[in-house]
Amino acid sequence: MAYKRKTTGKKPTAKKSLTKRQEASMKRHSKKHSAQHMRYMKNLMMKGDTFSAAHKKAQAKVGK
């Protein structure tokens, strides 16, 4: 019987910059949200979070 390897649950390593698609999404998104919200989201996305995950966390932490 084969055993499953346990995953560590770590996120991918930090990125140098966002992808072009992420940049475009952030630009559209910035029209409705504060600079603090956008900055928090960008930091999360640079650490490996998806746009949606970063948005939910930013909404909870800093609001709109």
Image: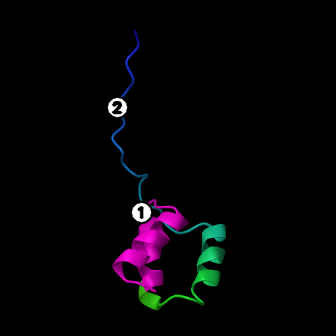
- Secondary structure under the numbered disc 1 in the rendered image: loop
Q: Residue at x 55, y 68 (%)?
A: 18
Q: Which residues are magenta?
A: 37-64
Q: Confirm whether the magenta stretch covers residue 52.
A: yes
Q: Which residue is mark 1?
A: 47
Q: Amino acid at mark 2?
A: Lys
> Local crowd at mark 2 within 10 Å, few (<14), some, or many (≥20)?
few
Label 1 Cα neighbours within 10 Å, binned few <14 / some 14-19 / many ≥20: some
Image position, residue 54 (x, y; %): 46, 68
Magenta stretch, overall SS: helix
Name the N-terminal-most of marks 1 and 2.
2
Name the amino acid type tagged 1.
Answer: Lys
Residue 48 highlighted magenta (yes or no):
yes
**How far apart in space, not on screen, are marks 1 and 2 (Cα)?**
22 Å
Q: Is residue 39 above or below residue 14?
A: below
Query: Which residue is situated farthest in the top direction here?
Result: 1
Which residue is disc 2 drawn over? Answer: 6
Judged left or right of residue 30, residue 14 is: left
The N terminus lies in which quarter of the figure?
Answer: top left
Q: Position of residue 40 (x, y in %)?
A: 41, 78
| Viewer-side residue, 10 vs 56 | 56
Number of marks: 2
